[in-house]
Structure formats: C-alpha cells, structure tokens
Image (spheres, coloured by chain):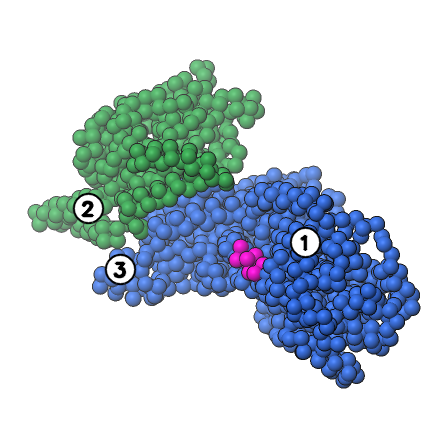
Amino acid sequence: MAEQKHHYSTEPEHYILSPETEPFLERVLFNNRQVVVAILALLTLVFAWGMTQIRLDSSIEKYIPLQHEYVQNYLVHKDDLNSGIANIKIAVEASGGDIFTREYMETLSKINDEVFFIPGVDRSGMQSLWTPNTRWTEVTEEGFQGGPVIPSTYDGGEHSLQQVRENVLKSGQVGRLVANNFSSSIIDVPLIERDPQTGEKLNYQAFSHEVEKRVRDQYGSDSIRIYVTGTPKKLGDLLDGAVSIGYFFLAAIGMTAILLFWYSRCIRGTIVPIVASLVAVVWQLGALALMGFSIDLYSVLVPFLVFAIGISHGVQIINGIAIESGKGANELQASRHAFRGLYVPGMLALLSDAMGFLTLLFIDIGVIQELAIAASVGVAMIIITNLVLLPIAMSWLGISRSGVVHAERSEQSDPVHWRVLSGFASRKAAPAVILLAVALGGFGYHYSQDLKIGDLDKGAPELRADSRYNLDNDFMVSNYSTSSDVLVVMVETPVEMCNSFKAMDIMDRFMWHMENQPGVQSTVSLVTVSRLVTKAMNEGNLNWYALSRNQTILNTSIQRAPGSLLNSNCSMAPVVIYLNDHKAETLQTAVEAAELFKSRYDDQVDDMYFGAKAEIIDAAIADGKLDSVPVRLQLASGNAGIEAATNQVIEASQDTMLIFVYVVVFSLCLLTFRSLAAVACILLPLALTSILGQALMTALGIGVKVATLPVIALGVGIGVDYGIYIYNRLEAMIIAGYDLKEAYWRTLRSTGKAVSFTGVTLAIGVATWIFSPIKFQADMGILLTFMFLWNMLGALVLLPALASFLLNPEAIRRRHDKRHGEVPPAA
Amino acid sequence: MRSVLECLSRKGSGLSLLSTQNPVRRLSGIFVALAISLSSSTVLAGWTDPLDTPAAATEKAHQTLLLDVTRAGDRLVAVGAYGHVIYSDDNGQSWKQGKVPVTVTLTAVDFADAQYGWAVGHDGIILASQDGGLSWNKQFDGYLANEALVAAAEKRTRELEQQQTEATDPQLQEDLDYQLEDALMALDDARYDVEQGSTKPFLDVLFLSRNDGFALGAYGMLFRTRDGGKSWHDIAADLPNPDKMHLSQLAVLGDDWLIVGEMGLVIRSRDYGQSWERLELPYDGSLFGAVQSGQDWLVFGLRGNVFTSSDHGDSWRQLPTGSEQTLLSGSVARNGAVALVGNAGTLVTLERDNVSSTPLIRIMTLEGRSGLAAGAAVGDGWLVVGEAGARAISASEFKQSVGE
C-alpha cells in the first residue's frame, strides 16, 4: 500500500503536452544541472543589469484611458490647458486670529521671499498679498483707480493694517487669496515645468521636499500654520509614498522568512525559496526594464506578488523534497521526485495566474495594462526560477536533517484540524457547508448591488483621507471659495472666433445650464471675465453685467483675460465647472448634463472647420456651406472629466474582464483535469470569494476603480492555485483507492499545510500594502489579503464539500484505469 | 404630451415594482429620455439668437443675477439674467418663474397696474405682460431699435440738409455744417450697428398708464409708446443730451419727470415731456437713480454720492452718506423711508423725522458683499435683488446688523 501510495502521489496523473514530453523535460534538466544553473546565473546577471536601468515614471497619462473620447479630446488641447496644472498654493494661517497683524504680515513677507527663491518657481507669476500684482481697483468719477493691496507706505502700524484691510476688500480677493474668514491668505505659486536653461523637467519630489523644508518646517508653528496643495505637491507626496513601498517589501521578506523557517525548520529550505523568489523579482524587473517599461505606482506592487507567488510555489517543492528525503531518497532523487510530482500543478497554477493577469489587458488604461504585462512576465519567470532553479539547487544542497524530521513528523501527525476539515468531504457535513456558502453568496450578491464605480472619498483620491495633503486640501476647500474637483468642457471654434458673440453666448448658456445641475458649485469661462470687465468698464454698474453683442466691446472685455481661459489663437475656450466632489454620481450627472447640452447646441459640420482660418469660414458662409460660425463643445478635461472617462471605461470593462478571467481559468482547469465536476469544485469557491469581495468593497466604501479592478483578476488568477493543488492531490488519493473522506484527509496531511502556508505567505505579501500612504495601494492590499485568505478557506472547506456531491470516486478510478491500465505511466 | 406623461407615470408605478434598483431614478430616466425625444423634435437644433430663444425653466432664478424688482399690485416681480422673470405672492418667500420668449438679460421692470407690465433689457428687448407677470410677449428688440435709430438719423440728416439749403446766414450755415456732420456720424454709427447686429441695452422702463410708457437706456436711447407698446418711437432727440450719455432712470417725482444718467446728467420736464431741461449739479460723476422722499428729491450714483433738492431740482446739496460704494437704485417705503442699494452689498437707508432737517442715515453691508441692483419695501423691511439673486431683509435683521 505504501508502495502504491508513493507511486500515485508522485507520478503525474496529468500532463501538459504529452505523457512522453514531461519525463524528457525532467531528464534534460536534471542530467545537465551544471549547464542549466550556469545559463540561469548568466540570465540573472543580464536581468540584474537590466534592473539598474529601471526608472520611476510619474507621467499622468498612464493612469487615464487614453483611447476614451474625452481623453482624446483633452489631448488635442493638452498644451493649451496645461497652464494652471503646474502650480501650488501655500496657505499661511494665523491660527486663532486674523491676518491683519504686524507679526502675520511680517511672516507672510518672509515666506513669500523664501518661496520666490525656490528653484522651479515662476517668479513673475507668483501672487500673494505681498506681490505687486495683487491690486485693488475701484471706479471713480475719473475712471479706474487702484494700487497694490499692501501700499508702498506700509509700516506695520495700526493705520497701515487698516489700509490693507480695506484694500483687500476692494481687491475682490476674498475667497481667492484671502480666506473667507480672514484668518489665512494664500501664496499662489506657478511653476516652470522645464528648466529654461537645461531643458530638464522639474523634479516634483525634490520641489515638494524643498517646500516642506523651507516653508513648513521653517515657519510652521503654533501661531502660524502652513497648508500646501496643488498637483506638483501631490505628485511629490505620491513619489515619497512609492519609495516607502520599498520598506514594505523588506518587511514582507522578513515575515515570510520567519514563516518559512517555522514551516520547514531548515535554514536551507528557508533561504533557497527566498533567493529563488528574489531571483524571479530581479528577472521580472530586469526583463521589464529591458523591454522598455518603467515602474509606476501600480507596477511597483508587482514584485510583492511575484515574490509571494514564488514563495508559495517554492514551498510546495521544499515540502515535496522533504517528504521524499524522509523516505530515504538522496538529494538528487528527492528533488527529481518533487519536481516530477509538482511541476504540472505548479505550471498549471502559474499559467492560470499569468492568463488571469493578461485579461487585464482588456482594460484600456495604461497602468493596468502595464501591471498585467509586468505581473504576467513575473509569473512566467517564477516557472523557471522556482520550478526549475529551486529543485536543481536543492538537488545539491538538500534538506537538513531537522527539516526532514519535521516534514516526516508532520506527515505522520494527525492534527485535529485536518480531521475536522476532512469531515467536510462527507455527505453529512457537506450540505451544511454548501448551504452556508449559498447563503453567503446570496448575502454577498445582495450587498454588492450597492457597489459604486469610482472614487468615493473626498480630496485627492490617490492619498489617504487623513494624509497631510488631503488635510491641507480640506483646509483650502473649507476656507476658500474653490473646489478641487473640476470638470472642463472645451468649446471649439474656428481660429480667432472663440470670442464671437455666438460662441460666447453658447458658453454663457452652457454655464447656466450646468449651474442648474445638482452637484455643480459654480462655473468659470471667458464669459465670466467678459461680463465682469464689461461691468467694470461701465462704472461698475450691475446692469451691464452681461455679454455685449458689440464685437469691439467683446474683444476689449477679454483683452486681459487669463491665458488659461482661451488658447493662443482663440479657437478654443474652456468652460471650467466646479463640482461638489468627485463621486461617480456627481460626475455622471454633470457629464450627462453636458452631453445633453452638447447634443442640442453642437453645430454638425465638418471637423475641418474647427480651428480653421477665418477666411475659410467666411468663404464657407458666403457659399452657403455654413450658416454661422461653427461652435462645438468637447468633453472633457479637468480631474473630474478624466475621472468620468475612467469610470466609464471601468464600468464598461469590469464585467468583460470578470468573464474573461473565469473563462481562462475554466479552460485551463478543464484542459488539465478533463472533468466538469473537477472544474466546478475548483471554481465555485472562487466565485463565492469574488462575490464576497464585492460585498466587502461595498461595506468598506471602496469603489470599483483603476486600483480595485485588477484585484478581481489577481484574486481569481492566484486564488485558483489552492484549488488546483488540493484537487490534484485529492484525485491522486482517490485513484489510490481511498474513499473521499480518507482521500481528503490524506490530501490535507501532505498538501493542506503547504496550501495554508501559501495562503498566509500571499496574504503577508499584500497585507503590508495596507499601510501604504498611497490610498489605492492600501485598498488593493485590503482586498487582496481578503481574497487570498478567503480563497484558501474556500479551497479547504468548500471544495471537499462540493466534491462529496460532484465527484464519483469510482468513475475517476475507472477513467484512470482505462487510460493507464494497471501499469503506472512513464517510469 | 400631458396624457403621454400621465400614461407613462401610471405605467411607471408598475415598472417600479419590477425594477430592483432605484425605481425613481429609472422612471425619471424614462421621462428625461422622453423629454429629450419630444424637445429635440420641437426645438431647433443648434444655437438660436437669444432674442428668439425662450428662457429655460429653472429652479435657481431667484439665486442668480436679478437687476430689478417691482410691485404688480401685491405681487413682487423681479427680472434678471437669462430672460428670467420671477414673481412672488408671499413677499419674496417663494418665487415662480414667468414664461418669457427670450434669454437676454433683463434690466428693468415696471407695472402700470396689477396686470399690465413691461420689462426691458439687453439687446433692446421690450417685453409685455397682461397677466401680472406670468407670461410675456415680445414687443420690441434691438434690431427694430437699430432700424428706428437709422430711420431717425436719416430723418435728421434730411432735415438738416433741407435747412442748410435754405439757410443764408453764414453763421447759421456753419452751425448747420457741424450739426450735419454729427448727424451723418450718428447715421453711420446706426447703420454700422444694423450691419453688425450689435444692439444696445435698455436700462429702465416706466409706464404712466396701460398705454403710455417709456423705455430708456444706453447711448441716450429713449423710446416712447402711447399705445401700450404696439409701436415705439425714438424720442431721444427731444432731450438735451448731445453727447448721447447713458440714461439710467426716468423717475416721476410728484408732477415732475426726472431723467438721470452718465456723468452727472440730470434732465427735468415740468410739462409731462413737452420740453426737457438740463439741470446743473455740483457733481459730474454718473448718477443711477432718483427718488422722492417727502418733498425732497434725491439723486444718487457713483461712490456713494447722494444729492438732495428741496426745490424741485433747482438747487442741490450733497448728503454725506458715509458710504463709498456706488448706489444703483432706490426705493421708498410707505412711511417715507428710503433704501438705496448698490455695490458690495451696500444698503443705505435714510429716515426722516419731523424735527431735524437731515435724515438719519444707516448703512448695512450684506454678507458676501455681492452687488445689489434694486430693492423694494416689504413690510417693515426690504427685499433686495442683485448679483446673488433675491434676499429679504427684515426690520430686525437690519437693526441688528447696524448695531441697534
């Protein structure tokens, strides 16, 4: 019986190409161990060199769906819209008082000077109470009168401060440069994105550190508080966060090592899988760098996955070797047997991982696609490093005596928990388990109906709600009349016609249309400026607060409009719509309203007329080809516009992706096990996890977004491993002649521990992300940890329960006998 | 259309039983889809001139730019941006929107009685209502105004040419030469406006009766009707306003009529418009309005300047208000108290007791400091309109804010 068991448990019951190829593969690899290791070492050197070439990529474009119509429209005008993105705002608060004190003004002046000299600052564009471009104006009988808000006669005295207070009121800067409650004021700092001398791109991270050091650290105190917001600062914080992920990686390695040693009780059995998995990481990073990819905030997580997956497979091999060694095999024999027994389920599991990742390619967002490629490459690397390199290395090193003893002891031991678990493989306990699973599934499905698309928290979604940046952002939003959630609609006209009455009137109506939508706070465009200036030119009389039909007046009124409100040749003018938040519903309402307006107002004329020269338009109007100046609205830009596009892409692709990933694992399992019952046993627990995962997202208030979409594919792709390992062994035990309960108990004794170990190592790898300062990494960490652990539980509990109903041990044995007869295959 | 909606809504209640997710939203989605399909077949695609585009229905008209408010009987009627006319039968607690055939900014409104009212605004629009402000129809617009101005300019040049051929006195001829030159320039301007389609805003409207009314505004525009607005006549030439200063307001002060305008312009008629004379003020800044308080006249304008006259405008003296904010409009309560409103949320009240000769002046600055364009007495307090829409200020709130 022992002979037979030995035979059945190590001979591959299933194969990938043909029964003949696999032993051949084993022979080739193990008969030329030195050559194989030499080649692998050489490759490692090459990839290690490649890894030094890798760069961190902070470009925004990879995070957005480039093919989406909105993004395409945005890219057309990207350069025109760029102004305004690269600036930061520094709010200086006099805590508990107001800004009209000598001390505050002095500090503000010092900070202003400090910021002025930070490299990268566009000094001419800087604005604060202390810059000369902050002026007050008023209409007098003689015309306009005005001056700098802080007069040249300022001396810090009571009279001067009173004067500043009056000038601030006259300047119209309350809510913009000065807080609505007068307890803080802003230094608005535009940045030069490229150094004019060297042409080098501004390093946001360095800039952000400089601001922290020279402003917050130096001037922040109990009486003066500093708040900094703006895209460059956010990017700087994100890049800082990305660096901290390195420490998490070290932590994950440490925890895994401890676990591994506890599991194997063998130093060699601990170090070799870790080294092999690290080699996989080096290969993966090196290969990506050599392929020309860079690391971003998502793919920086892939090494964790590669490492964890590598360890989990390595552990199976080590376990196998230890068991074989216990049976008296020498190092080489033990390694070969372990390889022979495990490379098929290992390869199958890894292939399904890789295929699962590749389904992410269906999502048209750069970071997700690169994540898919990076993870697939990484998993492909594991096949070589952990299924080939590791057993070959162990064939020299071998398992230590203590490890063998430990493995033997644990195989002989009969722990209560395996007995309990094996009970689930009987028809007595199984119905309860299945009922519970169905109930959980129903509950999860019901709960997941409220799952939202998009980011649900306020502030910068990339960072945590309680991060420094988001707290600062909160301060700005609540004390100033601005919103950080902006939808931009680009109004296109022919050249020099963005200020024609028709275009301006359409913008005006569009703004009012949008202001009537729930979730819209206010709107700004060229029309806002034109109306204000027209009013000002008419002695501040509110009756003139309207668009003029007189083209000369229109032209004059926008002469000094900020460059961000029209492009250089006046063929595009953005309408900026400030939203309450960036919740998916808010975005959708706003975007739908804009689309409705667009459908009514867009001139349906040939594309060529937009951005065309005035002569062409005049000629076309004269020819009767056009009725009037063509105008159209193009969605969308601004963080809200891009996010709306992203949400649409995600909504459209989430079901497709889920279907594809299941089709892939279904096909792979069916191809290998050639039994629908087997596939059902493996996939149903996964499906339950997917449903509960969605319910968990709903409960935690995590939306389906760029960061969480890959989790589903990763969860299924990696989660299937457990099922494959367990089913593979279970089937072998059934063929060996045990009844289901006994077969499952024996399965648990040999692989159960390895499987639960796999679940825990994987969970450790991703759980460290939960502490990431980058919110989407934390979200991914929570969900993946849940999915890895729950998938393990599903495989250990639900799989046997299902098997007790779906599998027919007799039929399995018959099929095996029919195929292989009494003689075991390929000795 | 209504029957279709009713049918759908009945059907909708059935639908909501079937749908698992938010039945209300699903139903409203159907309505929106229906509304779009209906409206797209009736509303012309693409942009139409604001003078031909009906004002869109909105819930927010009372929260956006409003430029004038008046009484139609007990009802308050206010006008403002995007062709908004809103009315309130509860002194500004709640507002309903009137049906208006244009989307241009309306600057002024006046009712001859509870039913008959007129509103004027940008693009030379004149609207009339015969149902107390619920619905409005177009009587006149900038294109017609431009044509009328061209016609008037043509008539003027013809007359001058005629006079010139008849004139023999060289002095008179030289005068006529200048006048003709001016007239030709005016004609050119008028023709240019017609060609360009650029129009001028009316800034005020006043009706003496259901038939007799005025509309006046930018560049000295003054039109009069005697048939309730069926025909409007350019009578700008009657005014001593050779430089075509903007006319801000025409006020009836007792038996006299007073027009105030740009750069200290004050014009009075003591014979119901038969003749007009320019009055001299010790001030040449722009004036935006005039009211009568007791026997005294008040005119006001730029930078908080208020002038008062006790002799029907023959002599004026300045009333120091203490405010530097431009005052745009005035209204008088039943008890004779005057409220002047203006930029930066400024509300200046002038109350007169029987003892002292100068009124008690109090200034309130509304929170948010958004500009105010007009006001009306409501009970003991005021209803003001402006940049941020309509806002009622009770007597107690006012007292509190001025520190009483």
Asked which quadrant contains residue B28, the reply is: top left
Specify start and end residues of the magenta stretch as a single range: A655-663
Q: Position of residue A39 (x, y in %)?
A: 74, 82
Q: What chain does mark 2 sit on?
A: B
Quadrant hosting residue A711: bottom right
In the image, residue A274 sits, relative to residue A115, either above or below, namely below
How packed mark 1 is, by other alpha carbons closer than 10 Å (few <14, some 14-19, many 20 or more), is: many
Circle 2 sits on which residue?
B147
Looking at the picture, do discs 2 and 3 lie on one chain? no
Q: Is residue A42 magenta?
A: no
Residue A254 is at least partly visible in this image: no
Residue at x 75%, y 53% (from the top left corner): A741
Left/right of residue A431 with respect to residue B294 in the rendered view: right
**Callout 3, which amino acid?**
Leu
Distance in Å between CA atoms under marks 2 and 3: 27 Å
Nearest the eye: A736 or A549: A736
Whole-percent x and y of residue A5?
A: 79, 65
Residue shown at 39% from the left, 18% from the top: B334
The subunit carrying tag 1 is A
- Amino acid carrying mark 2 in the image: Glu
Q: Colour of chain B?
A: green
Q: Which residue is mark 1?
A: A803
Q: Nearer the viewer, mark 2 or mark 1?
A: 1
Residue at 74% of width from left, 70% of height from top?
Answer: A11
Seen in the picture, residue A343 relative to A144 is either above or below; the reply is below
Q: Is residue A218 left or right of residue B345?
A: right
Instruction: Return the residue at label 3.
Output: A626
